[in-house]
Image (cartoon, helix red, strand yellow):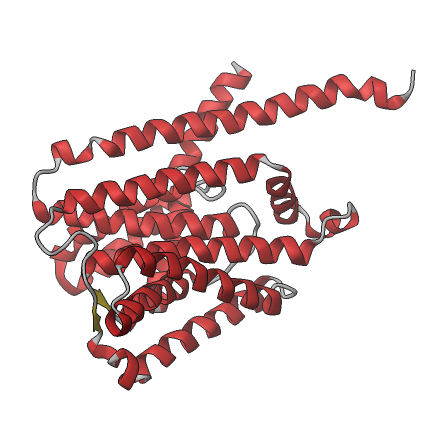
Amino acid sequence: MNIGTQLKPYWEKGRRFVEEKRALDLILSSTILLIVAVFPIFVVSAYWRGVLVVALYYALAAIGWNLLGGYTGQFSIAPAAFCLIGMYTSALLGHYWNWPPYLGILMSVVSTGIIGLLLGRICLRLRGPYLALTTLAFAEIVRSIIRFSYDITRGDLGLSVPRLYGGERSHLYYYYTFLLVIVLVQLLVYLLIKSRVGLYLQSIRDDEVAASGRGVNVVWWKTFGFALSSVICGLAGGLFVHFIGLASPEMGLVMQSGLIIGMAVIGGMGTLAGPLVGGLILEPLSEYVREFGVQHMVIFAFLIIIVIRFWRAGLYGSFKNILERRIYNG
């Protein structure tokens, strides 16, 4: 009997084990989405419903970053820059050519995909801090161009854009629109990670040299992951600008990228629901501690340090790990 035949049962057992873990992540994520869907029943304040919409925006952007940082292992500091590009793509098309919001959002996806592909092609031969610094420089260039192109973008004054459902619609319309988009994006991410392409991306994260040695085109698949991550961030920005009705370069600050990355890390990198959990906890928490005045960022940062110190896999990631140990180890 050859070695291949002897190893086949172990290979099948390992494959089923991985599949079961993915299935558990999908079941837990679906449960969390159902819970999020009934949130507005218990939150009747218009202000806090607006906060929840903002939280879903950050969660969607964090899902985009997680595809790159969590599943592919590439550390970009530009998620907010791609959100900003998505915002201004739709805002400029609507402001100067009266494009409807739906077409503007579609073009946000197209523009961020093209820019993400070009930037990824240029910088994804770099690793670690070099990649992080390159994306940081790119983010600052984008924000500076928008800020100082006053004749086109009105600079720091911002650009007014029409709201997606008109001015009098309830926040609930936006809440469920963002939630529907998150469900579709999470389904896309799940199918991607489960596919052969997803295995390529995760093999690059685990050992880039070994993946290259096994025939994976590392630069191409990293570029693909970068472009897809940029598209999701652009979609988040395009949707969000038609919720707040204003495009501003302030949304591209490095602090905004830090917030998006922090949500993915605290929720749980490399998991489906981690960024959503991070967004829904951190954004309302950020609003709550704002009552403490200028010290609110200190309190906020301190809470983040505690979470990272005691739950390295993130809140959702740690819970999922405990559940997996209970299920698979008895």
Q: In this rendering, does residue 152 appear at all?
A: yes
Looking at the picture, tell me which residue is in the foreground, 132 or 68: 68
Look at the picture and state if 227 lies above or below 330.
below
Percent x, y for residue 149? 32, 84
Image quarter hosting the N terminus: top right
The residue that appears at 50% across and 22% down in the rendered structure is: 325
Percent x, y for residue 286? 22, 53
Percent x, y for residue 101? 27, 58
Q: Is residue 134 left or right of residue 308?
A: right
Look at the picture and state if 227 lies above or below 328.
below
The residue that appears at 54% across and 40% down in the rendered structure is: 192
Q: In this rendering, does residue 271 appear at all?
A: no
Find residue 11 and report its image quarter. Answer: top right
Total numbered labels: 0
- Kindly give the residue lying farthest to the right in the view shown: 1
Percent x, y for residue 78? 44, 64
Look at the picture and state if 287 lies above or below 118.
above
